[in-house]
Amino acid sequence: MKLIVAIIQPSRLEAVKSALTEVEVFRLTLMDVQGFGRQKGHTETFRGHDLAVNLLRKVRLEIAVNDAFVERAIQAITKGGRTGDEGEIGDGKIFVLPMDDCIRIRTGERGNEAI
């Protein structure tokens, strides 16, 4: 079992969800987050003053999958999250973490069956 954590552009969320559905990955957790990376923020004007906005809005997805679904989930996130054919700085990152156990609270099932 693995926990896939993906940080993507908010505008690419629907495309990522569609791509995940195509590869039969239906369960995910979503969080609105802010981050700072290569994009280095941008400048906005507020009441006539220029302000540097260092933290940019992103979406964090957490997806628990069985080992058989890891590569197809990664490919789906990459396909849905990439801007254009080549991609752009700020498209996001995917982290794959080992997951020791998963427990379904309702039934007490553990491991692969709980996912």
Image: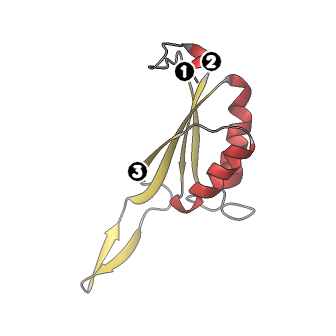
**25 with respect to 11 (left or right):** right
Q: Are circles 3 and 2 on residues that touch, CB within 8 Å?
A: no
Whether residue 67 is situated above or below residue 73 in the rendered picture: above
| Residue at (60% x, 25% y) in the render | 2
The amino acid marked with disc number 1 is Met
- As drawn, the residue found furthest toward the bottom would be 48
User: In front of the other: label 1 or label 2?
Assistant: 2
Instruction: Give the residue pinned by disc 1.
Output: 99
Q: Are circles 1 and 2 on residues that touch, CB within 8 Å?
A: no
**113 with respect to 85 (left or right):** left
Asked where in the image residue 14 lies, by quadrant, the reply is: bottom right
Residue 73: image location, x then y, percent: 68, 38
Packing grade of label 2 (10 A; few <14, some 14-19, many >=20) is some
| Residue at (42% x, 51% y) in the render | 32
Q: Nearer the viewer, residue 20 or 107?
A: 107
Instruction: Give the residue pinned by disc 3.
Output: 33
Residue 110: image location, x then y, percent: 54, 13
Whether residue 7 is situated above or below residue 9 in the rendered picture: above
Q: Nearer the viewer, residue 78 or 28?
A: 28
Local secondary structure at mark 3 = strand
The amino acid marked with disc number 3 is Val
Local secondary structure at mark 2 = helix
Instruction: Give the residue pinned by disc 2.
Output: 112
- Tell me how many marks there are: 3
Local secondary structure at mark 1 = loop
Packing grade of label 1 (10 A; few <14, some 14-19, many >=20) is some
The amino acid marked with disc number 2 is Asn
Sequence order check: which comes first, mark 1 or mark 2? Answer: 1
